[in-house]
Image (cartoon, helix red, strand yellow):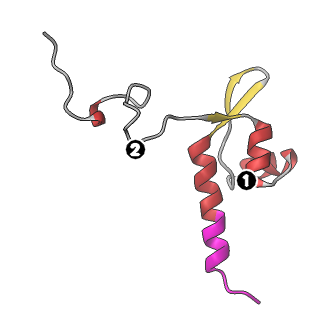
Amino acid sequence: MTAVPQSNDALPPFVQSAASPVSPVRLLRLPEVIARVGLKRSAIYQRMSEGRFPKSRSLGPKCAVWVEAEIDDWVHSVAASSASSPQA
């Protein structure tokens, strides 16, 4: 008989139950990133090279993806910095 973990903390994200508050990791392709952040492709890659935008991951020679949570965090940080900066 095998032991069953008592909490979802011991399980990897892809095994956790639907009732778990942790959402599964989702990968976004460039068109969806563009739609979410409102930047063009060149602006996204420019900011990535400057370290001001989340880095993409390569799934193959012609397939780049971004982690959804990292994009969401970036959007929230931009919104927070805009809200905290003084208006002219």
Q: Nearer the viewer, mark 1 or mark 2?
A: 2
Q: Residue at x 74, y 44 (%)?
A: 33
Q: Residues within 10 Å of mark 2 (few under 14, many from 20)?
A: few
Give percent across and percent down for residue 76: 60, 61
The residue furthest top is: 1
Seen from the viewer's position, the closer of residues 40 and 46 is 40
Is 24 placed left or right of 73 in the picture? Answer: left
x then y, percent, for residue 58: 68, 27
Q: Residue furthest left?
A: 1
Viewport quadrant of the N terminus: top left
Q: Earlier in the sequence, mark 1 or mark 2?
A: 2
Which image quadrant is residue 11 in?
A: top left
Left or right, 79 with reference to 44: left
Residue beneath the point at 60% across and 63% down: 77
> Is 87 included in the stretch rendered in magenta?
yes
Label 1 – label 2 distance at C-alpha: 33 Å
Q: Is residue 39 above or below residue 2?
A: below
| For residue 68, side relative to residue 2 (left or right) | right
Question: Callout 2, which amino acid?
Answer: Pro
Would you place residue 63 above or below residue 47 in this image?
above
Image: magenta residue range: 78-88
Residue 83 lies within the magenta run:
yes
* Secondary element at image label 2: loop
- Toward the viewer: 26 or 47? 26
Q: Which residue is mark 1?
A: 50
Image quarter hosting the C terminus: bottom right
Residue with the most extreme front position: 19
Residue that badge 2 annotates: 21
